[in-house]
Image (cartoon, rainbow, N blue to C red):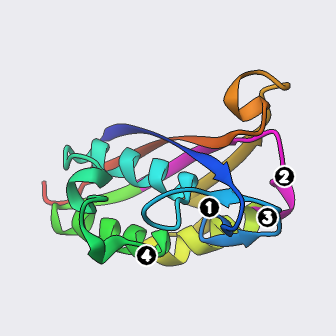
Amino acid sequence: MRIGLGYDVHRLVENRKLILGGFEIPYDRGLLGHSDADVLLHAIMDSLLGACALGDIGKHFPDTDNTFKGISSITLLEETGKLIFKAGYMINNIDATIIAQKPKMSPHIENMRENISKALNIDIDKINIKATTEEGLGFTGEMLGISSQSIASVENIKL
């Protein structure tokens, strides 16, 4: 068994959709980024790639490549799942946290879990998502951005 850790952060800006876990959340701002800036999925992808020693999302989906400009992070997650399987690993579990002062995440977490489950073709019970605030502290507490952390475990199936 192997374990990987992922982290991502993006700035909140006007005139962008807020996409988290492949789900559009109604909010007056969205996250700035080359893709749809889904910090949750980016952290999950990095934790999965890290667990398999496959680098990070910047290596596989660089923001210098216009192919990925505006792309859905669900599509990138699907590709990450294929990379992991091709390398001989299966996903045991994913545990992720969204750090945001607003908006409230709990009403949307089940939709996020379903999207991730479908994209990675794994049982939904292997995915846990939590949300927390930073009690008004730091850039997330001041509502300047949203961050996410993820830890994932994988198992080598080629042994």
Q: Is label 4 in a helix, a strand or a loop?
A: loop
Q: What's the residue type where badge 4 is placed? A: Ile
For the residues carrying marks 4 and 3, which lies nearer the camera in this image?
4
Dot 4 crowding, Cα within 10 Å, few <14, some 14–19, many 20+: some
Residue 136 position in % (x across, y down): 84, 26
Q: Residue at x 31, y 59 (%)?
A: 63
Return the residue at label 1: 125
Rate crowding at label 2 as few (under 14), some (14 to 19) or many (20 or more) other CA atoms within 10 Å: some
Question: Which residue has dot 4 on it?
Answer: 71
Q: Given the image, on which type of amino acid does mark 2 rest?
A: Pro
User: Foreground mark, 2 or 3?
Assistant: 2
Which amino acid type is shown beneath numbered disc 1?
A: Asp
Q: CA distance from mark 4 to mark 1?
A: 27 Å
Disc 2 target residue: 103
Which dot, 3 or 1, sits closer to the camera?
A: 3
How far apart marks 3 and 1 lie (CA) works out to: 16 Å
- Which of pointers 2 and 1 indicates the residue nearer the eye? 2
In the image, 107 versus 63, the foreground residue is: 63
Q: Identify the mark nearer the N-term, 2 or 1.
A: 2
Range covered by the magenta-colored residues: 92-108
